[in-house]
Amino acid sequence: MENEQRWVGEGDRDSTFSTTPLLHPERAKLIVLEGIDLSGRTTQIHLLRDWLTAQRYQVTTTAWRTSPLISDVLARARTKLPLRPLTYSLLYCADHLDRTERVIKPALERGEIVLADRYTYTAFARDEARGLNKEWVRNLYCFTVKPDVVFYLHINPEEAVRRRVALQQQRANVLEEKPKKQGEKKQKKVQRSERSATTIQLPSLTPEAMESFHDFEMKMYSQYQSMQKEFDFVVIEGSQSIDLVQATLRRAVMRLLLEL
């Protein structure tokens, strides 16, 4: 039930962010942001990092699929024929293991705050949505470091689809704009490169692709909903404005850092 979840944000807002420097935490913190696609995790991680850095905290960020050993393999796999769910699962686990050993643990040992844009819960949601055994997936990540807090940015699948369409249209509009300065070869070269990269990253959303995207987000959404109580997520309504979500996150993080 909703009143059993750790929601923050409703009735806990102000219009400005505090600029008072925070005390240093007694120990390192691992702070995770989770949510379905286009829930706003990455934007909020960047804003939170900049705010904490301004408070003179030492901050390290880590994101899903960014291991230097695995990210290229995953990128190539995503542009070719789809791999089997088990193969994807093992590759993403390898990515997380490498980042745990190279980034997360060393930063925590240095006493830093680690901000993670997605964590093992993304793997749990995606792998189980693809039909893999729940217990097998959970055991696969037995090596992971337990977060101090997990913020779940809640949006429904319909909102994810709406944001995907808006983003696709926005990028399409950018590609259609004519260069403002003609005759600048360097600018044209960059524009052609950006056009090519955007085309690869965001293929045209056909009705079939849109339906497939929505169906998978529905499965992911269901998994996240079931994990909320199990893992004690702090749930924040992600359909609010960016500023309101960030203000809620900052207050919650401040309380966490000041805990004895």
Image: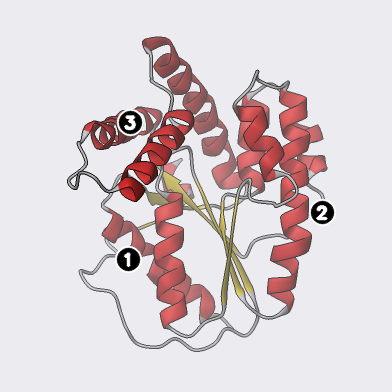
Residue at mark 3: 168
Rendered view: 151 above or below 104? above
Question: The residue under label 2 is which amino acid type?
Answer: Phe
Query: Mark 3 and mark 2: span between their CA atoms?
Result: 37 Å
Query: Mark 1 and mark 2: span between their CA atoms?
Result: 33 Å
Quadrant of the rendered image containing residue 180? top left
The reply to whether discs 1 and 2 touch (Cβ–Cβ < 8 Å) is no
Residue 155 visible? The answer is no
Task: Compare marks 1 and 2 and give the one earlier in the sequence.
Answer: 2
Query: Mark 3 and mark 1: span between their CA atoms?
Result: 28 Å
Residue 99 coordinates in the image, percent (x, y): 72, 56
Which one is nearer the viewer's eye here, 25 or 42?
42
Q: Secondary structure at mark 1?
A: helix
Left or right of 172, for residue 140: right
Residue at image position (48%, 85%) is 56
Residue at mark 1: 247
